[in-house]
Amino acid sequence: MPASKNALIRYKTIDQCLQRRNRLWTLEDLIDACSDALYEYEGNMNGISKRTIQLDIQNMRSEKLGYNAPIVVTDHKYYSYSDPKFSITNSPVTDFDMKAMTEAITVLKQLSGFSQFGELEEVINRLNDHVSSLQHKTQPVIFFEKNDRLRGLNYINMSYDAIVAKRPLDIMYKSFKSPKANPLRFSPYVLREYRNRWFLFGKAKGVNMILNLALDRIESMEMGDAKNYIENTDFDPVAYFDKIVGVTLYDRSEKNIVFWASADHTPYIVTKPFHKTQRMIKQYEDGSADFVIRVIWNRELIREFLGFGSGLVVKSPRQLVKRMTEQSEGMYRNYCCGNKTDEI
């Protein structure tokens, strides 16, 4: 088993190297990259032989593992994929993979009965449905929300690896406000998914505050040297996310946000709360109700509220009421003036 696990680490590392087409990869480069990966993940300080990597490349090229990787050699020394879009992670699922996934699901089902593993239920259902549809070549019966055009998902693995290994990431990042991408040396601490988008939280070199980077705004990412990693000494992600809806934390204090919901929307808001602190404080005869949540309000919360249209009204605090009023008045002007509603 250890040899198989080490081999998988090497295959993944070689795959990641060959996907990075901004440099040329010699056999020695691949040996060094695999040695570093095995040290990071397994603490393995034993060297890797040239023959081992050559056999790995041969296995990746063959049908043995189902990869059929189009690895080519140029100038008798530089390795690359002839197809720039190829990755072994995009390869069809093999019988070996199917057996491994089925075994994994069996183990996860046993764990899901314990309270500390309760959150595995959704993961198990997703895996079970996916494996079943692959085995029987049928349509899945469970559909989860996804955005097929969402960018940046290819950076999740490297982000996760960097967090675990405590290594910085050299990132080219293009914010919504910037006309071009800018370099950023970023020490990642946590990944967060919100509304089907992924965000990376951590600290950037020269910036003494927690930043969150949207993965779909990243144009390139490379693993940096561990010696340049900024240790996390003051960021508690659980406390951070407990205070907000979404991902953005402003320098404000927590407030009781009181809002009214119409009779049509009240049952929905009761069954799908905005935040874990939500409670109903008054029910009216017409079925509408007042609710309160205690959070630091941000733009994500405003968007959630606006999504209910006239069926939700914020009552306090005053500053948030003002912001909601400005947003509502802006929407009214856009509709009543007609300049934004021409037929297409």
Image (tube, helix red, strand yellow):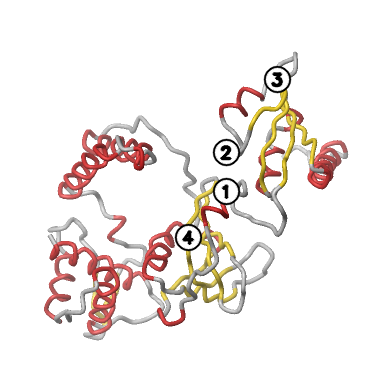
Mark 3 nearby-residue class (10 Å; few <14, some 14–19, many ≥20): some
Indicate which disc, 3 or 2, sits on the residue closer to the N terminus: 3
Verify CB contact (< 8 Å) between mark 2 and mark 1: yes
Q: Which mark is residue 276?
A: 2
Name the residue rendered at 26%, 37% in the picture.
Answer: 109
In this view, the residue in front, 73 or 146, is 146
What is the quadrant of residue 113 in the picture? Answer: top left
- Dividing the picture into quadrants, the one containing residue 60 is bottom left
Dots 4, 3 in contact, CB < 8 A: no
| Label 2 residue SS | loop
The kind of residue tagged 3 is Ala
Residue 263 disc label: 3
The amino acid type of the residue labelled 2 equals Lys
Badge 4 or badge 3: first in the primary sequence = 4
N-term-proximal mark, 1 vs 3:
1
Q: Residue at x 72, y 56 (%)?
A: 252
Name the spot of residue 211 as percent of width and height, x first.
59, 65
- Residue 287 vs 185, above or below: the answer is above
Does 5 sit left or right of 314 as displayed? Answer: left
Discs 1/3, front: 1
Gap in angstroms between the C-alphas marked 4 and 2: 21 Å
Cβ atoms under marks 4 and 2 closer than 8 Å: no
Q: Is residue 89 above or below residue 102?
A: below
Task: Identify which residue, 175 or 25, lies in the foreground.
Answer: 175
Distance between mark 2 and mark 1 Cα atoms: 8 Å
Badge 2 or badge 1: first in the primary sequence: 1
Question: Label 1 belongs to which residue?
Answer: 242
SS type, badge 1 = helix
Q: Which labelled disc corresponds to residue 190? A: 4
Alpha-carbon span between mark 1 and mark 4 = 15 Å
